[in-house]
Image (cartoon, coloured by chain):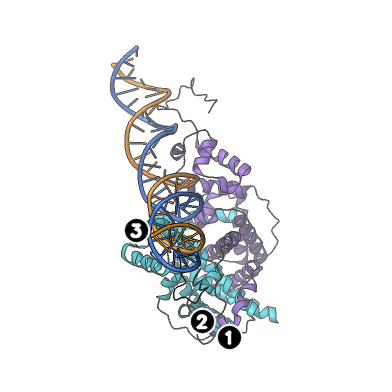
Chain colours: A purple, B cyan, C blue, D orange
DNA sequence: CTGACTTTAGGAACGTGTTCCGAAAGTAGC
DNA sequence: GCTACTTTCGGAACACGTTCCTAAAGTCAG
């Protein structure tokens, strides 16, 4: 609100001077999140944090999603970078797992994530995860097409796990997990019926990392076969 | 909540008679969707379709998500069932692809989908997709743990592709696809920089089915190795 | 100084899902 | 018939993201 050093400037700017800016909005959003928590970030709250009308924000940001996209970069940029192992396969797996964890710790994955978005948005200091996957694919001998397909496949797998888990966790937290059937008709769906109630207790925990390794191996083998 | 038959009287019911029921709400929702389209389903619209106050619905459904979960069964149950090929790998791939397509044609995947939800919710006539995957895994020799892990992995991959694609499509339709960077620092992210603008044009179309085959092969190979 | 022009501000309003709470409408016992 | 109890109804209200539209506040030309 203060320190508007524009009175003496001979700028060609015309019109009413802005009372805030996109940069100020982002800073205030980060401050609000760090202080009150992720779920307290609403447009009206953010506006009053800035001492500004809610509508005013919409002259500097397109909508809330636009804001969230910027906050993703802020969040991912602050994460630590683990060392990437040697060997194409392990490098891909570790980089992908880091990407997974980065997204898992971000509440608004569902609102924002697009493959191109993630890759095209982040600052280079945070893109080592994508780079690690591409480097591993290249080291293995993948073509550019195969590398991109590999990344996209990992991306889908990762986003799916993030969203399903986040959604399930939210329902559990709210005590809203419905009691779904665990008894099935053995004639029509025998394998499902054989699993029955065991379904819910089996292999929930390690599905992502174990599946990721199998996925990467399968994709690399497929790439080899394609080039043969 | 139902049939509080404390006495042997013909009607033990007391209190004001309900003006609608959960079943009527679901029927009206389907009618509304079939007539006016998916995006026209709102709580207030649905209530006025029934000639009822909006609040009244909340005495029969928990919230909108509860309603959507029921509608998923309706939608999936109406789909055609393709023949499943022989051989564990192909059967898994075809069944998974059918599951994928079923979800891709359903607008509210992001709001509702949980692994257990999908499996535990559907009627047996619609569970042939899950059964096909489990049958293929079993035929291949997977343990129950491995079968469930395989299904979950495929599920994550599928849900991720559905949501990312739906989200991207929505942004394109609204003309809101931001112009993300396609030029990267060749020193810090050389492989990404080498791809550059080609990123967006490469291998978008066939990522899911091709990746799915590689994924299934990798998971089955991993299961073999585990049991060796 | 005055009037035209340009740019931003933000109150009011809309539609959304959802909750609070008093009113309404039935049954059961006296 | 009256009272108590039980169950459902639904208007009013809330917080949310978002849009419309008018007022405000600056620059610039005369």
The answer to whether marks 3 and 1 sit on the same chain is yes
Q: Residues within 10 Å of mark 2 (few under 14, many from 20)?
A: many
Which residue is more in the foreground, B167 or B188? Answer: B167
Q: Which mark is residue B61?
A: none
Q: Are marks 1 and 2 in contact (CB under 8 Å)?
A: yes
Residue A123: in sight, yes or no? no
The Cα–Cα distance between marks 1 and 2, rounded to whole angstroms, is 10 Å
Which residue is more in the foreground, A3 or B56? Answer: B56
Q: Are marks 3 and 1 in contact (CB under 8 Å)?
A: no
The answer to whether marks 3 and 2 sit on the same chain is yes
The answer to whether marks 1 and 2 sit on the same chain is yes
- Image quarter where the C terminus of chain A lies is bottom right
Secondary structure, mark 1, is helix
Secondary structure, mark 2, is helix
The Cα–Cα distance between marks 3 and 2, rounded to whole angstroms, is 46 Å
Which residue is more in the foreground, D30 or A186? Answer: A186
Q: Which mark is residue B48?
A: 3
Q: Does residue A8 sit above or below B73 in this rendering?
A: above
Residue at x 55% of width, y 36% of height = A49
Disc 1 marks which residue? B139
């Amino acid at each position: 609100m203060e320190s508007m050093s524009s009175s003496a400037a001979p700028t060609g700017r015309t019109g009413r001077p802005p009372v805030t800016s996109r940069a100020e909005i982002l800073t205030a959003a980060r401050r609000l999140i760090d202080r009150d928590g992720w779920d307290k970030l609403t447009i009206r709250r953010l506006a009053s944090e800035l001492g500004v009308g809610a509508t005013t924000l919409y002259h500097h940001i397109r909508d809330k999603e636009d804001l969230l996209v910027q906050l993703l970069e802020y969040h991912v940029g602050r994460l630590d970078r683990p060392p990437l192992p040697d060997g194409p396969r392990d490098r891909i797996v570790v980089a992908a797992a880091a990407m997974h964890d980065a997204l898992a710790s971000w509440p608004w994955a569902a609102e924002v994530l697009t493959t191109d978005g993630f890759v095209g948005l982040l600052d280079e200091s945070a893109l080592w995860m994508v780079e690690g996957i591409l480097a591993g694919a290249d080291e293995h001998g993948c073509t550019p097409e195969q590398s991109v397909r590999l990344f996209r496949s990992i991306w889908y797998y990762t986003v799916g796990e993030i969203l399903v888990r986040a959604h399930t966790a939210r329902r559990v937290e709210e005590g809203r997990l419905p009691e779904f059937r665990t008894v099935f008709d053995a004639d029509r769906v025998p394998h499902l019926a054989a699993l029955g109630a065991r379904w819910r207790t089996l292999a929930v925990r390690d599905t992502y990392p174990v599946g990721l390794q199998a996925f990467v191996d399968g994709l690399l083998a497929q790439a080899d076969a394609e080039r043969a």
